[in-house]
Amino acid sequence: MNNTASLGLLTTILLVGLLLIGATAASVLVNTPGEETEQDLEKITKEVTNEITTYIQIKDTVRKYYKIDGEQKIQKIAILIKPLVSIDIDITALTIKICNGEQIKILSYSGQTAFIKSYPLFEHQIWEETDHESYSLIATHDKDESTVKYNILNDYTDMAYITIKLSEQFAMEKGDTITITLFPSPGTTRTITFTAPLPIKSIVTSD
């Protein structure tokens, strides 16, 4: 898809999004009485706006518990991303902020991207090459190998997991909450909030 087609698709998405916001607003104003109206409208508007102004889509999130100092803590996080449209997204320009409510850590790209191949997600060798100060990527779909070879997501079908290995300081016990914010270029930021559930299973899927 060339730049003109991408621009046209983005314009269409924006127009559809604005129509959805207007239709939803009208519905909420008619059907929702009292104080809930403004809160519901603000939430819906924010969700729709985020989707139509961010080039990176978040398709899935997965976390895994490990025993640290005798306690079960989430230490590995994988976030599945894909481009909204066919546009070049430079992985090396993506910055990630992690906040646990008390401290903030900024992660940069480790320079490591590999195909998933036959590895289980959390057993992939890429984790061994990723420290607590950086993130890597595991490509699940990349037909022209642009992600692995050139660090570029360039097609709307490209998909890759961002791999984040939390330090012991940021590892999450039951009830802990952290926020992870993606700062892509181009596009607006995306923020995800994770709360660690009861560690009944070692792998936790999207909230």
Image: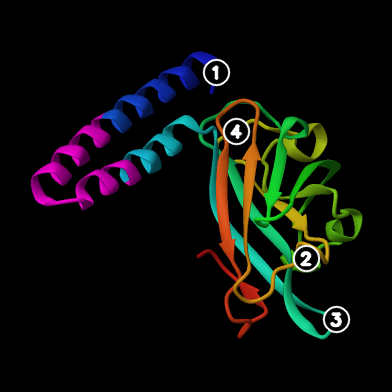
Among the 4 quarters of the image, the one containing residue 204:
bottom right
Please state the horizontal and vertical placement of residue 104, each as a whole percent of the image: 73, 48
Of labels 3 and 2, the one closer to you: 3
Residue type at mark 1? Asn
Mark 3 burial class by Cα count in 10 Å: few <14, some 14-19, many 20+: few
Inter-mark Cα distance, 4 to 3: 43 Å
Q: Residues at badges 3 and 2 in contact (C-beta under 8 Å)? A: no
- Residue named by callout 1: 2
Looking at the rendered structure, the secondary structure element under dot 1 is loop
Depth check: 18 or 102 in front?
102
Inter-mark Cα distance, 3 to 2: 27 Å
Q: Give the range drawn in magenta.
A: 19-43
Depth check: 89 or 159 in front?
89
- Residue named by callout 3: 69
Residue type at mark 4? Asp
Depth check: 139 or 108 in front?
108
Residue type at mark 2? Tyr
Q: Residues at badges 1 and 3 in contact (C-beta under 8 Å)? A: no
The numbered mark, 3 or 2, whose residue comes first in the sequence reads 3
